[in-house]
């Protein structure tokens, strides 16, 4: 079949129109959701709401103790998942060939884990951390369960970022006598920083919005936890409870959702700014040492 110039132009025009329509549809859906949350939550949102403790099952009071539990669970999840996930990604990207059986088995396992429903992780966390290890319904049990959920995301994104670094960088570093460890920390990780940041943001977004896994592990108590072995309710669980189980809790649920969205936006902005600053300092350092911005490092 021979396409004339006018046929190709019409086909390109329809393809471009479809792309614009899809983008507009996504933006419209996001704008509608965000405007609904802002409209429903602004009237109830105040400083007293952010720092106060919940009363009357969340209908009154604030979310101060909920934010403390959320921060603790997220901190434990990241502290447990980041070193293990990024170390696994570095091992796969630098020491395991893309076509090896071991690497393929690890990647297939990660894909399977990514598709596992969060409630299954919750049941696993309850059986292993809460019951078998004796942690009970606690912040520690919830954080470690979330760490298991974050590992596939962190490993996959970090490995993809490290594999996109051209082999010429690794060969040049080896020719200059740099060790693999020095090459990883001084050359590969700064270049792959955007991918690492993207995986970190995806992980934080999933962890801070998770409910099902935490219902079985961190518990449901809305007081401020006294220790990591105490139970605590995260912000997403609090929104779920207000929406589903508390009559008259819609206003507080909207305000809590607005706080959650604002926190996610702030985390995204801070992470992107830190990543841009890290790369800018690395480029300036390379220039001051005689490196080119686009070429491989030279002696």
Image (cartoon, grey):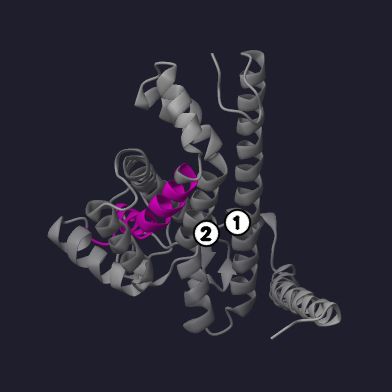
Count all numbered tags in the image, as a single digit: 2
Q: Position of residue 294 (x, y in %)?
A: 65, 31
Q: Which residue is mark 2?
A: 205
In space, the residues marked 2 and 1 are separated at their CA atoms by: 7 Å
Where residue 143 sits in the image (x, y, percent)? 35, 54
Q: In the picture provided, is 69 more to the left or to the right than 44?
A: left
Which mark is drawn over residue 264? 1
Q: Residues within 10 Å of mark 2 (few under 14, many from 20)?
A: some
Is the C-beta separation of discs 2 and 1 under 8 Å?
Answer: yes
> Is residue 136 left or right of 3 when viewed as pictured?
left
Magenta segment, which residues?
136-162
Side of 7 relative to 254 (left or right)? right
Q: Residue furthest right?
A: 6
The tag earlier along the polypeptide, 2 or 1, is: 2
The magenta stretch spans residue 146: yes
Q: Residue 55: give x, y in percent of width and height.
A: 52, 67
190 within the magenta span = no
Q: Is 258 left, or right, of 17 in this rendering? A: left
Question: What residue do we see at 49% from left, 75% from top?
Answer: 240
């Amino acid at each position: 079949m021979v396409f004339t110039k006018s046929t190709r132009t019409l086909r390109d025009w329809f393809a471009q129109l479809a792309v614009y329509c899809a983008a507009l549809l996504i933006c419209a859906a996001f704008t509608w959701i965000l405007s609904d949350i802002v409209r429903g939550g602004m009237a109830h949102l105040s400083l007293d709401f952010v720092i106060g403790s919940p009363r009357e099952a969340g209908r009154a009071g604030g979310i101060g103790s909920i934010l403390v539990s959320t921060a603790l669970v997220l901190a434990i999840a990241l502290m447990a998942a980041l070193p293990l996930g990024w170390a696994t990604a570095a091992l796969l990207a630098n020491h395991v060939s893309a076509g090896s059986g071991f690497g393929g088995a690890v990647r297939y396992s990660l894909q399977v884990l990514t598709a596992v429903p969060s409630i299954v992780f919750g049941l696993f966390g309850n059986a292993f951390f809460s019951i078998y290890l004796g942690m009970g319904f606690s912040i520690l049990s919830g954080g470690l369960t979330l760490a298991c959920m974050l590992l596939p995301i962190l490993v996959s994104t970090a490995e993809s970022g490290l594999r996109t670094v051209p082999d010429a960088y690794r060969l040049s570093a080896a020719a200059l006598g740099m060790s693999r460890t020095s090459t990883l920390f001084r050359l590969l990780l700064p270049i792959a920083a955007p991918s690492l940041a993207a995986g970190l943001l995806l992980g934080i977004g999933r962890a801070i919005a998770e409910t099902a896994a935490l219902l079985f592990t961190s518990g449901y108590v809305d007081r401020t936890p006294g220790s990591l072995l105490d139970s605590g309710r995260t912000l997403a669980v609090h929104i779920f409870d207000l929406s589903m189980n508390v009559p008259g809790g819609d206003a507080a649920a909207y305000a809590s959702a607005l706080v959650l969205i604002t926190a996610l936006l702030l985390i995204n902005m801070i992470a992107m700014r830190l990543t841009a600053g890290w790369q800018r300092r690395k480029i300036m350092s390379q220039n001051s040492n005689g490196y080119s911005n686009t070429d491989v490092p030279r002696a």
